[in-house]
């Protein structure tokens, strides 16, 4: 169990795919308060306090921030597809509740570290021939605009000295659980599940589609590392390093590691999904690289990490 | 009275200082729906429908957008000082209600023209040695961050083809009425009232303070003109031209035009106000200039316009 002298951290969206791995990674060194509107299964983890509830509920934010926090990692979100389906809910959670959470965490005056899970969706589509730290934000999804707006709020609150904020733009994270996720990119994760299980799968993007991918375990490591990065109030936005791969190569590598038949995979490209998730150009992240952040290193490692997590 | 075939426009914040002049300017050519939470005194204007109510009330937005609108000019806001005093109210009106209004106006599918009154507060302080169309946004006030966030929403909704949006960044507008405005820059307007009335006034900035100013009547003209500007979905943000003047010169010109004694004005600079409102560098607005937008032209014209409006 974490010592009483350990630092306190709030994780929102802690019951989600990324949140679960993150809370486990944090629980050895931090006193973790974990919130989610879905179930929170951390009964086996001493030092973790589960606080179920909806972030759009002001009372939940008040309880989660009643004591000063040393850090907040804000993962909770209504993702891309779900945000298009319910714009009002998405604005309430992704924008209004996010602002309220940041303000409440700042109110104790102790300048907490705040990591915000932004998204490559801030870049929109079509993407320029190369994406780097200077690429302008042109979101097309509501979700991407919401993320860009909260990046702005984090930047302002950091300039004001209210928080020590950092927005980290996440690429596609694999392999998320099967089932409805509200994510338009869910097919990227379904591929791992179906191919390993020997089920045929038809992908809505072409074999030559290029994607930026990161495994959950590598992401959790980067988030923990980011808590201790040196602060730069002049620049509170980082695009996380990601491996750029073609779907063809991902399929071949899953087949190689699992013994599955790559011929189970077929393609029926959807132009909108191909544009949004299958046309990701070379990605350069010099600022994150210089800070020691990294992706999975190789396609073999990425696929191994993703398969080990299924 | 405007013909039934005239186009329909919704003006929010229509009871405010800018809104009142704008509605009058629009009323000859447009069917205007005017909303404000404060009083709306347009009984003398045929073709103007007054719709009192609070924009943070979803029902008001629903009523204001029940019919398709050809255009919206969104002025309603909780300004700088008032937003710092009540952050939750400001987030509700400046961000949540603004997003909901834009979505509701877009929902008819007719791509309405949407002009958003943004602010030079998006640039923050200290300002760089020169401000132009490429100056990055670094708001320091909550109000400035809110404006930058809605600029992002307008840009996204325009890229999506839901609206034909344009965010116009307003400089200091003179001369607003005396009395509590919730604006940190209220002293710029009080100067006109007090000096003309022969009352002593102590300004919280130095004589050499430099400000970007625009008169209300010139602003109203620019907003009407902006309704018909050619669309550029790739760039939905414009900084309005403004006259850059020193307070010393403004005082001298008001004294010249009114016969008042400039010695009534004293200075007790407040460092925060001097930084935020008294240190405005040369302003270059080539994009707005190329579109035919303009400021008052001369200090004499600016002061004459402001005095005529008191």
Image (tube, coloured by chain):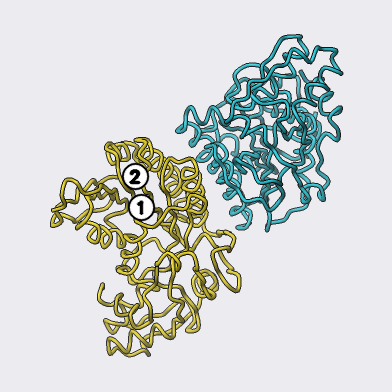
Chain colours: A cyan, B yellow
**Residue B190 drawn at (x, y percent):** 35, 74
Left or right of B249, for residue B8: left
Going 72% across and 13% down the picture, which residue do you hit?
A194
Q: Is residue B284 visible?
A: yes
Q: Judge the density around disc 2: few (<14), some (14-19), many (≥20) Cα neighbours within 10 Å.
A: many
**Residue B89 drawn at (x, y percent):** 42, 47
Q: Secondary structure at mark 2?
A: loop
Q: Which residue is mark 1?
A: B76
Q: Which residue is mark 2?
A: B55
Q: CA distance from mark 2 to mark 1?
A: 8 Å
Name the chain letter of the residue that bears numbered label 1: B
Left or right of A224, for residue A257: right
Name the chain letter of the residue that bears numbered label 2: B
| Foreground pick, A153 / A133 | A133
| Foreground pick, B104 / A195 | A195
Q: Is residue B184 visible?
A: no
Which corner quadrant holds the C terminus of chain B?
Answer: bottom left
Q: Judge the density around disc 1: few (<14), some (14-19), many (≥20) Cα neighbours within 10 Å.
A: many
**Residue A181 drawn at (x, y percent):** 61, 22
**Residue located farthest toward the top when viewing the structure as drawn:** A198
Going 33% across and 88% down the picture, which residue do you hit?
B255
- The reply to whether label 2 and label 1 mark residues of one chain is yes
Q: Are marks 2 and 1 in contact (CB under 8 Å)?
A: yes
């Amino acid at each position: 169990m974490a010592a009483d002298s350990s630092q306190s951290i709030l994780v929102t969206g802690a019951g989600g795919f990324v949140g679960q791995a993150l809370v486990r990674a944090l629980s050895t060194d931090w006193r973790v308060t974990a919130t989610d509107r879905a179930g929170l299964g951390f009964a086996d983890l001493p030092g973790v306090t589960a606080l179920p509830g909806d972030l759009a509920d002001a009372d939940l934010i008040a309880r989660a921030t009643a004591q000063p926090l040393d850090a907040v990692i804000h993962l909770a979100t209504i993702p891309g597809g779900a945000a298009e389906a319910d714009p009002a809910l998405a604005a309430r959670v992704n924008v209004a509740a996010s602002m309220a959470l940041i303000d409440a965490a700042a109110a104790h005056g102790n300048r907490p570290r705040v990591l915000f899970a932004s998204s490559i969706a801030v870049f929109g589509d079509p993407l320029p021939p190369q994406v780097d730290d200077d690429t302008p934000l042109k979101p097309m999804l509501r979700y991407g605009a919401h993320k860009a707006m909260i990046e702005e709020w984090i930047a302002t609150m950091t300039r004001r000295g209210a928080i020590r904020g950092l927005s980290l733009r996440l690429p596609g994270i694999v392999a998320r659980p099967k089932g409805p996720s509200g994510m338009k990119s869910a097919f990227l994760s379904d591929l791992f599940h179906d191919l390993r299980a020997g089920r045929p799968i038809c992908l809505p993007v072409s074999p030559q589609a290029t994607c930026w991918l990161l495994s959950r375990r590598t992401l959790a490591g980067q988030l923990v590392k980011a808590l201790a990065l040196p602060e730069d109030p002049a620049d509170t936005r980082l695009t996380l390093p990601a491996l750029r791969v073609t779907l063809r190569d991902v399929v071949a590598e899953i087949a190689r590691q699992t013994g599955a038949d790559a011929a189970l995979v077929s393609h029926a490209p959807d132009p909108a999904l191909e544009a949004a998730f299958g046309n990701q150009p070379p990605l350069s992240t010099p600022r994150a690289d210089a800070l020691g952040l990294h992706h999975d290193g190789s396609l073999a490692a990425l696929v191994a990490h993703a398969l080990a997590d299924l």
